[in-house]
Amino acid sequence: MNKKSIFLLLSGFSLCTYSESQWTDNITIYEYNPIELSYDPALPEYAPYPKNKNELTSLINGAESGNLTNRYTLFSFYYNNCYHLQKSSDNTGISEHCNTAVYHLEELLSSDPENPLALFHYGFILSHGYGKEKDTKNAITYYEKACHIGRNRLISACDFVFSAFLNGEENIDKDIDKAREHVATVAGYGNGKYQKYMDNWDYILFRINTEKEVNNCIKSGGNTAECIKSGNNKMKNYYIK
């Protein structure tokens, strides 16, 4: 049996790698973010971002008349500005673009409550407090909905849920049983990564217990380097599928 690695501690989420150009009135025109493009690569073709004020006004008028595609485009347009401004190191408040993005997103969800991308981004906004009060517990509810509706096209939503149950998050207790149930469900969607998690669930539990042993070793006054070395050796000697 070949030894392979399974990454359990999911890497920090980032909506990076945008193309951008400048616009007036503190607006930067970004492209759709990687999560959006992975879900629907054709978005820029049938729902392009506005390039000037006239196009923006046209989008707003269409959205107010019930065009849900326009509504999502407006959300995404303002949200990507919100995201980048909130990530800037010198930012201390909530950008006006975040509030505008949330308005359009909530309007969209009121008309289309099962829109996977809208659900995913609302979860992300709640988990980070971008224009809404931070609410990690409620965010997971939106991530779960996005995962089960979007399935393999929106696996990032599933990853957030898995990480929250497996590791515990702010206001969310670690729950290994829920994590396993979630993995089994997503594996049933035909996702190869989650099928691998399911096949190697014993290793996942082994790794969690080993990490706990290492932490207990360090807390009890053991030599940090030796504690870590012991844990690494245990994992090196464990063969997985």
Image (cartoon, helix red, strand yellow):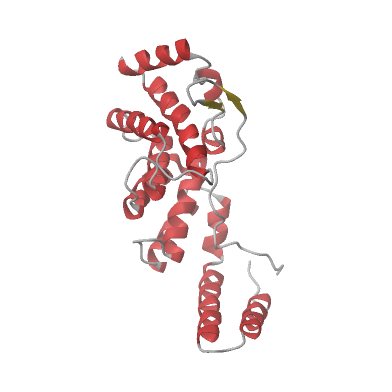
Nearer-the-camera pick, 237 or 130: 130
Q: State which quarter of the image contains the N terminus.
A: bottom right
Question: x and y percent of residue 82 in the render?
Answer: 46, 36
Report if residue 184 is visible in the image: no
Nearer-the-camera pick, 188 or 58: 58
Question: x and y percent of residue 125 in the render?
Answer: 40, 43
What is the count of numbered marks?
A: 0
What residue is rendered at 41% in x and 22% in y? 69
Q: Is residue 125 above or below residue 108?
A: below
Nearer-the-camera pick, 196 or 156: 156
Nearer-the-camera pick, 10 or 80: 80
Side of 113 relative to 8 (left or right) = left
Question: x and y percent of residue 178 in the render?
Answer: 38, 62
Q: State which quarter of the image contains the C terminus.
A: bottom right
Q: Is residue 65 above or below residue 215?
A: above
What residue is rendered at 66% in x and 82% in y? 225
Residue extending furthest bottom? Answer: 221
Residue extending furthest left? Answer: 110
Report if residue 232 is visible in the image: yes
What residue is rendered at 52% in x and 48% in y? 190
Side of 230 relative to 145 (left or right) = right
Q: Is residue 130 above or below residue 231?
A: above
Q: Is residue 187 above or below residue 112?
A: below
Question: x and y percent of residue 97 in the render?
Answer: 42, 31
Residue extending furthest right? Answer: 2
